[in-house]
Amino acid sequence: MGIIMNTYCVTGAAGFIGYHVCKKLLDRGEAVLAIDNLNNYYDPELKFERLDQLGINKEAIQYNKVISSSTHPYLQFIRVDIEDYDNIFTIFKDHDFSCVIHLAAQAGVRYSIDHPFSYTQSNITGFLSILEACRHNHIPHLVYASSSSVYGLNTQQPFSIHHGVDHPISLYAATKRANELMAHTYSHLYGLPTTGLRFFTVYGPWGRPDMAYFKFATAILEGKPIDVYNFGNMYRDFTFIDDIVEGILRVTEKPPQSVKQHQIDISDPALSPAPFALYNLGNSKPESLADFISILEQKLGKSAHKRFLPMQAGDVFATAADIKELEQNFGWHPHTTLQDGLEQFCNWFVEYYNRLHP
């Protein structure tokens, strides 16, 4: 008897986290159907470069056309918008997915302040499209990206999935919280197992150019000033990409189960009788922005010219993840120190930057 292979659908596959998830699944011998719309929120060339690493030829990509990888026999790629429900439904109908890992979204807290409709289109309508396709095609497990930004004005530290999250301070955060509520509704009404992962400040090689650490590295190498908000007095639970990917893949292997309502306290926002779960995915060790920049300077071998500014709209002072549920249920714990993670990022970034600026 041959080996039974799992088939995963990964949306946002040309993005930072999506690319690394696809690579890890392929290294593990799984089959992957990768989806991305390759939008221009940031330079699409970086997205094409990530796909090139997976053997997807940029020149062969057309809308809603299946492309096979030249280097991975079990990888296919489709360029499609997640809000294009008819095509998403057909893709799901034509494949027998073991799990859907939904990472596609309009990202960025500050961008949401001036571009709100981008977020409702992708993060609300697009997520509904994924939920409906999962529902009608009997997907065994939907794992989707939420965000630590849902904690908003919560001042309790560390952030726990048992805390209330009713005070978001950006539309991005509001759409991510809406995703959690929509997922719960589908878990309750249709028995669709869903797991939401609240990511905490992910960083690493092949990262997003709109993220602060990527902008810092670019400015430092170019000798330009960097904007340091709240005068550097901010704390973030910086989490290395390899740890994030390991957490995602462990969660995929154990869909949440339904329980009887009387067995849980439904006043707890993290608990439900439906097959629904939420987890924090963070380093659980907040670092100051000032220390982060200092390590970045050290690894790049060049000092930053800092321009100190007050806190920006939509920002929070600190993020810290309580990850005990993920540790207890999956044995997951982050292993990468900030020193090691930034060294890996900087080694990649210098090579990438030199390709752009020969």
Image (spheres, rainbow, N blue to C red):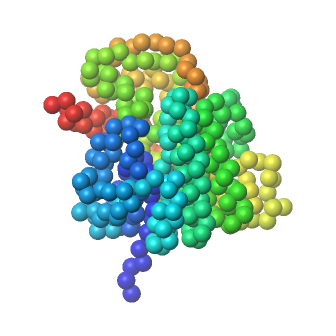
How many marks are shown on the rendered structure?
0
Q: Which of 36 and 331 is in front in this view?
A: 36
Q: Nearer the viewer, residue 120 or 299?
A: 120
**Viewer can see residue 204:** no
Q: Give the x, y percent position of residue 310.
A: 54, 14
> Residue shown at 66%/34% (left/top)?
168
45 displayed left or right of 264: left
150 displayed left or right of 213: right
Q: Which of 46 and 136 is in front in this view?
A: 136
Q: Give the x, y percent position of residue 116.
A: 56, 35
Q: Give the x, y percent position of residue 159.
A: 64, 37
Which of the image's four quarters has the C terminus?
top left
334 displayed left or right of 299: right
The answer to whether 12 is drawn above or below residue 31 in the figure is above
**Viewer can see residue 139:** yes
> Residue shown at 50%/42% (left/top)?
106
51 displayed left or right of 95: left
Q: Which of 210 and 221 is in front in this view?
A: 210
> Residue shown at 39%/64% (left/top)?
32
